[in-house]
Image: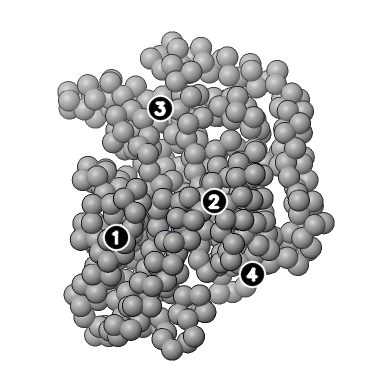
Amino acid sequence: MPRIDPELIDRENDRRAADHHRRVDHLAATLERGRSDPEHVISAIAAFDVAIPSWALGTGGTRFGRFPIGGEPRTTEEKIDDTAALHALTAANPRISLHVPWDDPDDPAGLREHAEARGIGFDAVNSNTFQDLPRSTGDGAVSYKFGSMAHSDPAVREVALAHNLEVLQLGIALGSTALTVWLADGTNHPGQASFRAQFERVAACLAELHAAMPDDWTLLVEHKPYEPAFYASVNTDWGSSLLLAQHAGPRARCIVDLGHHLPNTNIEQVVSRLAMVERLGGFHFNDSKYGDDDLTTGSIKPFQLFLIMMELLEAGGGRLPDLAYMIDQSHNLKDPLEDLLQSTEALQIALAQALVVDREALVDAQDANDPALAGEILMAGYRTDVRPLVAEARRRHGGAIELVATYRAAEYRNLAIAERGADARSTGL
Ligand SMILES: [Mn+2]
């Protein structure tokens, strides 16, 4: 099994220690001259973690093609091994999120043991009712071609509900506490179906699913304006998502996928609204330039990510609320593990930037109707190079000061290719 040796991380950290500590001390002194406590920032970064999606550990693809990288995880067990490698480096990826039936474990207890032995737990489980696969549509008697929970045929809706209940049972066996419904329902043509009838069918189905959940579980709904439904998605925007969650029940909440908004949507404001009514369930982190939801978190709009962290800290009274934080990306060019390392670090950086903002001074400037001063205070946080504190938070928990360089020094990809083969292909997007 390929793994990241903690001693290798120590050696790599030792090589960088002198320079690293100089940078940490300098930044800490700068922050202390302001009103920030560097130790508070370090412990808040260390407390943050983000789940790894099982489907993003192999290369993704577009309709134009897919270019596998070699050594991709062939089984869910191997996906867990890759997650453990990421967690060893970041100290921030202790859970994996499975997607059924791309992951279809026949021995959940054995899988749970495999994960526990590597210090990995299970995040939200995800259902799939947008592909006709034996595990989701059964023997082929029904099809999701025209929808699942929104389908006009009650037999299809029943199969979709049954699949979700099966995923729920699997999640219970694995120790997960959340189910995310991947709802692709909608229409591609005006007049194809009634907006209202489709919405009401989905709402009814989600309410049934909610009623079947154990008390400590959360049902997560995720909106997406288009794709695969290119005319009208049933759960098209945060308003629709909120209505569905409210209808489903008190333990239903909304996922905000950063790539699932129409251009120029003020996502940080969406976050604020959903948090205000206590229906913000979590995130699928990624980034996008145009209409995709695949690019490295924080690689295109790092300022937006920072502003989202600002809203989360406000919602949590200065701390991050306890939500389902997950990365949801497709890695077409980079080594998927390197992309996930960069995404995890981008989240840690955005959070640290938000943490060093002088929030009391910001509120005073807001109350004094002084937008220039408010901007000065906000940008002082955003423009602080917080990377030394982020690296220090990782180092103190056994992680790497430099993520990608340490990953490369470990030659993890070569080890994975040697064990799994150059043509090993992962299931997923
Ligand atoms: Mn998503």
Camera-side residue: 19 or 147? Answer: 147
Kind of element beneath mark 2: strand
Q: Residues within 10 Å of mark 2 (few under 14, many from 20)?
A: many
Query: In the displayed structure, would residue 320 be above or below residue 298?
Result: above
Gap in angstroms between the C-alphas marked 2 and 3: 26 Å
Kind of element beneath mark 3: helix
Q: Is residue 305 left or right of residue 121?
A: left
Q: Nearer the viewer, mark 2 or mark 4?
A: 2
Query: Residue 56: horizontal and vertical position, in percent?
Result: 57, 58
Q: Residues within 10 Å of mark 4 (few under 14, many from 20)?
A: few
Q: Nearer the viewer, mark 4 or mark 1?
A: 1
Q: Which residue lies at the image location 17% right of the left edge and 23% below the top edge? A: 368
Q: Answer whether labels 4 and 3 touch (C-beta < 8 Å).
A: no
Mark sitting on residue 66: 4
Q: Nearer the viewer, mark 3 or mark 1?
A: 1
Q: Disc 1 marks which residue? A: 210
Q: Is residue 156 left or right of residue 424?
A: left
Mark sitting on residue 105: none
Q: Disc 3 marks which residue? A: 355
Query: Residue 143: horizontal and vertical position, in percent?
Result: 42, 84
Kind of element beneath mark 1: helix
Query: In the displayed structure, would residue 294 be above or below residue 307?
Result: below
Q: Disc 2 marks which residue? A: 96
Q: Residues within 10 Å of mark 3 (few under 14, many from 20)?
A: many
Query: Which tag, 4 or 3, sits closer to the chain's start?
Result: 4
Q: Which residue lies at the image location 72% right of the left edge and 41% below the top edge? A: 4
Kind of element beneath mark 4: strand
Gap in angstroms between the C-alphas marked 2 and 4: 23 Å
